Amino acid sequence: MSITETIAARRSIRAYLDRPVSQDLLEQVLGAAQFSPSGYNFQPWEAVALSGVPMRDLSARMLAAAPQEPAEYQLVPRDIGDLYKARRDETVGHRMDALGIARDDMTGRDAFARNNFRFYGAPAVLLTFVPRVMGPPQWSDVGMWLQSVMLALHGEGLGSCALESLFVHGRLIKQFAGISDETHVFFCGMAIGWPDPDAPINTFERTRAPLAEVVRFSGF
């Protein structure tokens, strides 16, 4: 498929087949993503890939731990306004509908959310860190790298799901991965594996704002 078709087809995968992902394949994908753009060629992303026993060990530690204080960073801005709240609530609602969880069932929603710390059953996870010396422009570069990784994974038939929610255990993750808390911020995890094509959570209809709502053209 074309690049535009790949971008449109990629989605967050939250159910995976019981099938391993090889290190060779991940190296191929991550090697391609190294050519993502970054200002001044800083390449400000750093990552650790886990599978097998280390991955299960990290999952167990996060599930047993309380969220850290203070938080690694502020995930949702304060006072984001009705527009962004509506976009968030719409996609969360579709997700809960696909799972058969009532939208007002907070217990069910919280139980499903804990699957973030199980990496949704994926056979591999990528943990991404950013040096503290970096600022907002470099964080943008890390986002472009993550998008490159996700698109390259999709091109190989793999699925992924970015897991910013792991930020509540940022220091635990850094200690586990041998990354200094003084020098680095934990940004996000990424579940990686072969999508389960029959799982409703992987097939519900996604929505995006119409282009006219987010882009203005002039001079064409």
Image: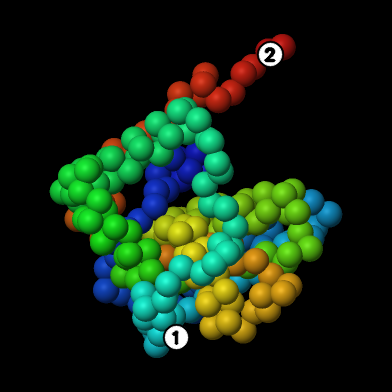
Q: Secondary structure at mark 1?
A: helix
In terms of depth relative to the viewer, which is nearer, 218 or 89?
89
Q: Secondary structure at mark 2?
A: loop
Residue 104 placement (x, y as % from top left): 22, 43
Q: Please say if the residues under marks 1 and 2 sit with CB atoms less than 8 Å apart.
A: no
Residue 33 figure quarter: bottom right
First in sequence: mark 1 or mark 2? 1
Residue at 58%, 64% (x, y): give it: 70
Residue 29 placement (x, y as % from top left): 54, 65
Residue at 46%, 45% (x, y): give it: 6
Q: Is residue 141 visible?
A: no
Residue at 32%, 65% (x, y): give it: 115
Nearer the observer: mark 1 or 2; the answer is 1
Above or below, 181 against 106 in this view is: below
Question: Tag on residue 218?
Answer: 2
Residue at 23%, 42% (x, y): give it: 103
Question: Tag on residue 154?
Answer: none
> What is the quadrant of the C terminus in the image?
top right
Q: Is residue 217 visible?
A: yes
Q: Left or right? Give the position of 163 relative to 35.
A: left
Q: Residue at label 1? A: 54
Residue 31 placement (x, y as % from top left): 62, 68
Within-10-Å neighbours for mark 2: few <14, some 14–19, many 20+:
few
Residue 181 placement (x, y as % from top left): 66, 75
Q: Amino acid at mark 2?
A: Ser
Above or below, 19 against 94 in this view is: below
Numbered circles on residues, count: 2
Give the CA distance from mark 1 to mark 2: 52 Å
